[in-house]
Image (cartoon, rainbow, N blue to C red):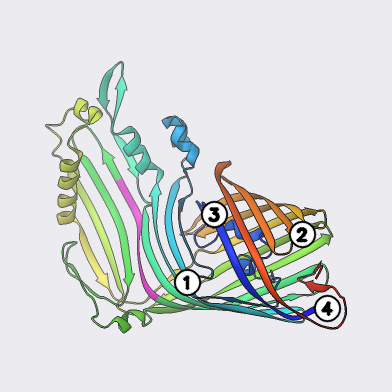
Amino acid sequence: MKKNIKSFVLSLGLLLSANFLQAQQVNNLYFLENAPVRHYLNPAFQPLSGFYLGFPLLGYSQYGIGNNSFTISSLATPKDDVFKSIRPTTLLNTDIQLNILDFGFRSKDSYFSLGITAKASAYFGLPKDMFKMFMYGFANEVDGVPQLENNLFDFKSLTLGANSYTEVALGYSKNIDEKWSYGFKLKYLHGLGNAKATFDNFDLTTGVEEWKINANGVINSSSPALVTVGDDLGSINALFPTNIIDFTKPSGMGGAVDLGVTYKPFDFLTVGAAVTDLGLIRWTKNTNNTNIKADYTYDGLGTITAGEIFNGIDNNAMFDTLVNNLKNAATITNSTTAYTTNLSPKINASAEVGILKNAISLGLLSTTMFHNKSVYQDITTSLNLRPVNWFNLALSYSFLNGRGSNIGAALRLWIDILYQDLKPDIKKYNGKFLSG
């Protein structure tokens, strides 16, 4: 009998992943063919089911933490080799994504989807000179004797920030023929809060007699809280609303787009490309743009010897002294004009080779993320097993900076409720023929 009409997906999934680079993206999903939500990575992908529904919190929800310089193998690597592998700016990032509503349905060769997702992220961009300072200190050993040196540390690429917004995405994809498919998503971004700090210059000069700090940066913020800024760093205060509804009102609004395409030049080969999260948010509520300038010289090093710096001194006391003096020396100016932030767009490029009627395939995925004028990239290889339609297993291995990064696994069981029609037939999904 023809197993037709619409198949409603009930799914039991297990996803194990250590994704050390890409915020809001689990690369293991890319080759998991029966995972309906993989169109988040390439909007040209169509789910196998005629209809799917992602329940609140239980749909495409995830939490991730990672970086773009260090891997597990760094723990057993000599310090000098670790330092050589550190990128000019190391991005430490964490993000959480909670599904509110997610569903999609097929109409002939087209597929429509709607997703509402709450997203929040935080990041630190650490310049390589900061690792140099903490790993090697301020003194070198010459013939067994510690010697102080004049050093210049450039911290200009230091960045930090946090972002929270709700995304409403309307998606469409179409199978043009047996070879080509395309898709796109239009997104409305409901900004809840943002804060970021960047520097035009930030130099720390250390020497035998004095240290100098020269910095010029800006802190931007927008949130439900009313933040007031005075004349110095110690005069910043925040007044939070008492009504919880006020936290859901927009602090900013914006838009974004996802674009994707797949091409199947041969029955055994599928290539794809996509750009996601190409957009921005304009922040207008309770905004502050605080410019900080500091030109400060610390000459209280007369009682500190090279041996103390080399072997360790009371770092906490020294740090507290520097921070307190810098706080008093810094001058700030503030404005409340609106400002704009970009999302972190990603480019996914893939190739997949299948054998045994696609029951086994090998996949290669290149992911490039653009964040604060910097580019971060990793490569994921994947072995994908599809012995039957309802069982998919993806085993992956990722490379970061040309080195092994992490091992991942994704398993999905797909259960269809199927309705019978009048005669045997074959149902076509996403340009692939699957036996009923």
Residue at 26%, 60% in the rendered image: 292
Q: Position of residue 146 (x, y in %)?
A: 26, 23
Q: Position of residue 414 (x, y in %)?
A: 66, 67
Q: Pointer 4: residues within 10 angstroms few (<14), some, or many (20+)?
A: some
Amino acid type assigned to the residue bearing label 3 in the image: Leu
Q: Where's the N terminus, which quadrant? A: bottom right
- The image quarter in which residue 104 lies: bottom right
Mark 2 and mark 1: Cα distance apart in space: 32 Å
Q: Pointer 2: residues within 10 angstroms few (<14), some, or many (20+)?
A: some
Please name the residue that numbered disc 3 is placed on: 16
Amino acid type assigned to the residue bearing label 2 in the image: Thr
Q: Please say if the residues under marks 2 and 4 sit with CB atoms less than 8 Å apart.
A: no
Residue 164 in the figure: left or right of residue 242: right
First in residue order: circle 4 vs circle 3: 4
Residue at 83%, 69% in the rendered image: 178
Mark 1 and mark 3: Cα distance apart in space: 17 Å
Mark 2 and mark 3: Cα distance apart in space: 25 Å
Magenta segment: 192-203
- Check disc 1 and report its element: helix, strand or loop: loop
Please name the residue that numbered disc 2 is placed on: 270
- Check disc 2 and report its element: helix, strand or loop: strand
Q: Please say if the residues under marks 4 and 3 sit with CB atoms less than 8 Å apart.
A: no
First in residue order: circle 2 vs circle 1: 1
Mark 4 and mark 1: Cα distance apart in space: 35 Å
Please name the residue that numbered disc 1 is placed on: 57
Please name the residue that numbered disc 4 is placed on: 2
Which circle, 2 or 1, is nearer the viewer?
1
Which circle, 4 or 3, is nearer the viewer?
4
Picture disc at residue 154: none
Residue 59 in the figure: left or right of residue 245: right
Q: Please say if the residues under marks 1 and 3 sit with CB atoms less than 8 Å apart.
A: no
Which circle, 4 or 1, is nearer the viewer?
4
